[in-house]
Image (spheres, rainbow, N blue to C red):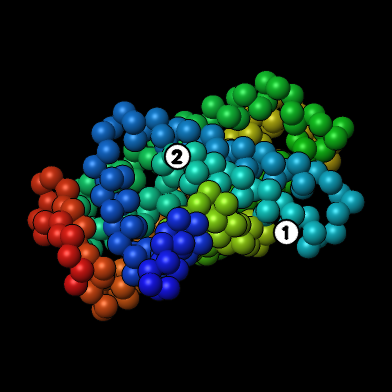
Amino acid sequence: MALAETSSKTEITGVDAYTPAEMEDKAEKMAIKKATMPLVPCFLLAVVAGGFIGLGGMYFTIVLADSSLSFAVQRVLGGTVFALGLSLVLVGGAELFTGSTMTVMAMASGHISLGQVLRNWVVVWVGNLVGALGLVFLVFMSHHMEMNNGGIGVATLKLAIGKIQPDSVTIFFKGILCNMMVCLGVWLAYACRSVADKIIAMLLPIGLFVAAGFEHCVANMYFLPMAWLLTATGHVPAGLDVSLITIPGILHNLVFATLGNIVGGSVLIGGMYWLIYRKAMGGVQSAPSAPGSTGTSYSATSR
């Protein structure tokens, strides 16, 4: 009787977290929904996500523009406020490319095809870019970059230079590390049963990747075009060399950051957790197969 009451109380209050095996099962089911979503809603949700991550980036540059902060305080605080972006994505509902790399978990189980995974990645990546560019236009037209006597604009330019300057290998590995942390934030959110739980769970992983200066392709879809627009319109302080901020420079970053993000999310997080909890341990239950795939049918029974 006491056990039943405790179980009932836990069910009502929602204080318990899902187990890692249940999280893997949720991740596969979410991957199937992502990969089989109709084109229009998938694209529009991706546009929304691009804007959301850009809002986190805008918040981050406000902190960067305060030169009175020490390095550690500036990076940690900046990473914390940047987490607004993923909070909006996870709670508000949106399709983010970096998180979508975990769809390989359902593909590995045979529930969706490689073609469905790649279709999702392309649609979401392009949608994220459209959303980020839309926010760039809105923020630029609001003259937000002129705040702090133009300090936010200068911070954005310096940030962009620092992102374009590294060689392709460095950007690639920064991309891997970045999406390891992003997907760990998403993975931890799968354990949660409330909005507050989700936000708290993903806060530290997201804060770390930002504070450490890793490369997130969608965030860079906001930072780099904004810096390019400032350069093209002459909003550059005297003495600052912005010669690297060009379209080829932006593509240099986005291509290798994207490739790194794919490896970090799909192989090192999604692939590893699939290997542990689905392949090695059998999983909680089989997930529903998508139309046209060769996977097994859904079964409600545990295995």
Residue at the outermost right position: 68
Q: Amino acid at mark 2?
A: Gly
Q: Nearer the viewer, residue 201 or 70?
A: 201
Which badge, 2 or 1, is on the more N-terminal residue? 1
**Residue picked out by circle 1:** 76
Q: Residue at x 48, y 46 (%)?
A: 90
Which of pointers 2 and 1 indicates the residue nearer the eye? 2
Q: In the drawing, does residue 274 fall left or right of residue 245?
A: left
**Residue picked out by circle 2:** 93
Q: Residue at x 29, y 57 (%)?
A: 28
Q: In the drawing, does residue 164 fall left or right of residue 175?
A: right
Q: In the drawing, does residue 128 fall left or right of residue 154?
A: left
- Quarter the N terminus occupies: bottom left
Residue 169 picture location, percent across and down: 51, 63
Q: Amino acid at mark 1?
A: Val
Q: Residue at x 86, y 49 (%)?
A: 67
- Disc 1 crowd, CA 10 A, few/some/many (<14, 14-19, 20+): some
- Disc 2 crowd, CA 10 A, few/some/many (<14, 14-19, 20+): some
Q: Residue at x 13, y 45 (%)?
A: 291
Please tell me whether residue 59 is drawn above or below residue 265 in the rendered image.
Answer: above
Q: Are marks 2 and 1 in contact (CB under 8 Å)?
A: no
Q: Is residue 171 visible?
A: no
Residue 38 picture location, percent across and down: 26, 33
Residue 63 picture location, percent across and down: 77, 46
**Secondary structure beneath label 2:** helix
Q: In the drawing, does residue 136 fall left or right of residue 7?
A: right
